[in-house]
Image: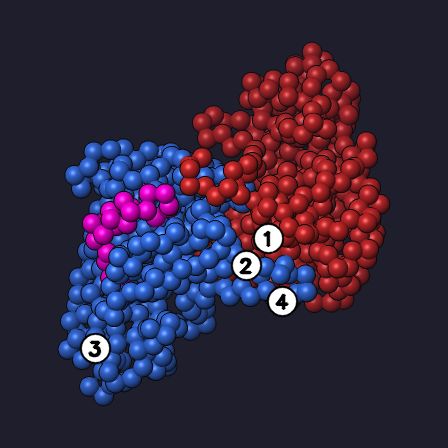
Chain colours: A red, B blue
Amino acid sequence: MSKFLSEKFKDLEPYTPGEQPQDKKYVKLNTNESPFKPCPGVMKALSEEAVSQLYLYSDPTANKLVEAIAEYYTNYVKENGKNFVISKENVIVSNGSDEVLAFIFNAYTDKDKGMACPEIGYGFYPVFCSLYGVPFKSIKIRDDFSIDISAFKGISENITIANPNAQTGLYLSLNDIKTLLSENKDRIIVIDEAYCDFGGESASVLLDEYENLIVVGTLSKSRQLAGGRVGFAIASKEIIQDLNTIKYSFNPYNLNRLSILAGVEAMKDVDYFNKTRKVVMENREYLKEELKKLGFKVTDSKSNFILVSTPKMGGKELYLKLKERGVLVRFLSDELLKNWVRITIGSKEQLNVLLKEIKEILGA
Amino acid sequence: MSKFLSEKFKDLEPYTPGEQPQDKKYVKLNTNESPFKPCPGVMKALSEEAVSQLYLYSDPTANKLVEAIAEYYTNYVKENGKNFVISKENVIVSNGSDEVLAFIFNAYTDKDKGMACPEIGYGFYPVFCSLYGVPFKSIKIRDDFSIDISAFKGISENITIANPNAQTGLYLSLNDIKTLLSENKDRIIVIDEAYCDFGGESASVLLDEYENLIVVGTLSKSRQLAGGRVGFAIASKEIIQDLNTIKYSFNPYNLNRLSILAGVEAMKDVDYFNKTRKVVMENREYLKEELKKLGFKVTDSKSNFILVSTPKMGGKELYLKLKERGVLVRFLSDELLKNWVRITIGSKEQLNVLLKEIKEILGA
């Protein structure tokens, strides 16, 4: 820390992202990437011609990408029995979903109105609150890690919930989300759907009814673009205006040319999206069953990862033993999760390597 | 604006970036892009194989890019008679230089210590101050647009100076910068060198002497990667630590995989860098002379643009007339510049189209 740093940041504890080792090749099941390569359209769109255009600025409105996301979600709500249009004015894109989450936390919180989140969620939420110097309220969850929405009653904060949960994979029903939206009409409710495409239903179907709803998404998990850094938020036109005010006061050209191109293709190739997420969900159920056979407790995850625990050792020990053997899973430092590790649903081959190593570690 | 937006942002006026029209093809001389394509190494590095890896997260430390920038500047200071090493710990990279400028303004300002800048500079600086709710102090410049460093005497703010100036192209000598650094040792001095490669000397040669110096750079102008979004800052290890604390509390994976790869190549190909900036500087002097022949006032720019003014019409009128004819230049809304337009140094062909249209407009 330099002596120049503002007092307000003297105690700022940054987020620790999952390891991204650059040296050694691991079976990497720690940061919830897709085991699939980007869709064929991405490969085509990022042509030599496209690369040669990098000397020109990208479109700061990322118009084509915003359009593709609006179109996907308009179709989505229609297929789910609703009939309203999600237009370009309802969408903002960002440099990964972390950036738009940061904009949201900045836009709607201040010293008098912080953010409330379930005590287990995405570890970044309290960090955003520290960054902006606003209160973070941790809301108790049940012993089985499920979210008790009645615990949000009577609070005065905005609310952010990762759904499915970013650490447990548990899914909160849209009915519960509707209750939260109805009971907190004067505050923002953020539903972070990074993992929603693996078995959840998107809260975007509620956007016609609730002006306090923001749905956040990413192309990192179900659309194979973690390394392309594309996230987005969908909300009322007024909220998207707010977020654009922040964006244009922070970094107008926040998406590079190639990520915009890749994002458009990834949103448009619905077949590839469906095919790949189906495999991930099948692999998830396979891994759940296999680990249960080995005596593991396994959360009922609707995500592309599962949270697991063995009575034979703590989470950190299992994580370290697997790492030694070249398999990277995530140990989450939260006290409540000290007996658990989070495992990304990789390819069947990767999962079989994992299972083999776990059996050897446990002597099973 | 939504009714939910925090009071603190009710009056936030975002930055207006230069037009990036997506519809029509212009001779685009408004946002200081390079007229050259990225170096051959970029074309090679962004291979099909590299694109296929987009399903994996990027390296949040962007280690290879940080290394390439450190190496370039270590060589630079050596070639300029200094003998110290700029190491990886002295460098942070960002999603365009706007992002690292935003981090810097956030890290070192607060309600009691704002930022002072020359009244003409990069239009984003006051916006960052609004975003963070900190005082912006505008420092008078001379009638000829040159910066009078004695005007910074006795202020209590940090100081940010674009050098060369982002609107006039005028260059402030390292001697003047040394004076500022010496006279303000308890505050941060940011030298934003977006345009420095077109005739200025980088203040990086002073990093061994001044712990309050931050040098900011971008690969958008002299390294043909405007659409790749790569910026950086160089400073003491402690300052880089500060900025990493902010980055990891905001968006750890702030650079995508392909921009990291492209950035490494662009930093390493010093021949291409030298060859292309030489052409830009030659074209600049050519354009200066031609416009002077037409009665224009022209600033002594050391950038890849010039600021020009004709007695025959105001800046806005000239901008609009050129736009009508398919040539895009930048009219800067500042009252002091109402008679001027800023013109990017494009290719010789582009400049000749510009000159032809200007002659027709002026009836010369």
Q: Is residue B270 visible?
A: yes
Q: Position of residue B102 (x, y in %)?
A: 46, 51
Q: Examine the image and state in which quarter residue B360 appears.
A: bottom left
Q: Which residue is mark 4?
A: B1
Q: Chain of mark 2?
A: A
Q: Position of residue B106 (x, y in %)?
A: 48, 49
Q: Which residue is mark 1?
A: A106
Q: Which residue is mark 2?
A: A246
Distance CA(mark 3)–CA(mark 1): 46 Å
Asked whether disc 1 touches disc 2, contact meaning CB atoms under 8 Å apart, the reply is yes
Q: Is residue A58 visible?
A: no
**Disc 2 packing (10 Å; few <14; some 14–19; many ≥20):** many
Q: Position of residue A4 (x, y in %)?
A: 42, 41
Asked whether disc 2 touches disc 4, contact meaning CB atoms under 8 Å apart, the reply is no
Q: Is residue B177 magenta?
A: yes
Amino acid type, label 1:
Asn
The residue sitting at 78% across, 48% down in the picture is: A155
Q: Which residue is mark 3?
A: B296
Distance CA(mark 3)–CA(mark 4): 43 Å
Distance CA(mark 4)–CA(mark 1): 14 Å
Nearer the camera: disc 3 or disc 1 = 1
**Residue B67 shown left or right of residue A217 in the figure:** left
Give B273 or B290, whichever is nearer the viewer: B290
Q: Examine the image and state in which quarter residue A314 appears.
A: top right
**Disc 1 packing (10 Å; few <14; some 14–19; many ≥20):** many
**Residue B207 shown left or right of residue B247 in the figure:** left
Mark 1 lies on a secondary structure that is: helix
Distance CA(mark 2)–CA(mark 4): 11 Å
The residue sitting at 69% across, 11% down in the picture is: A363
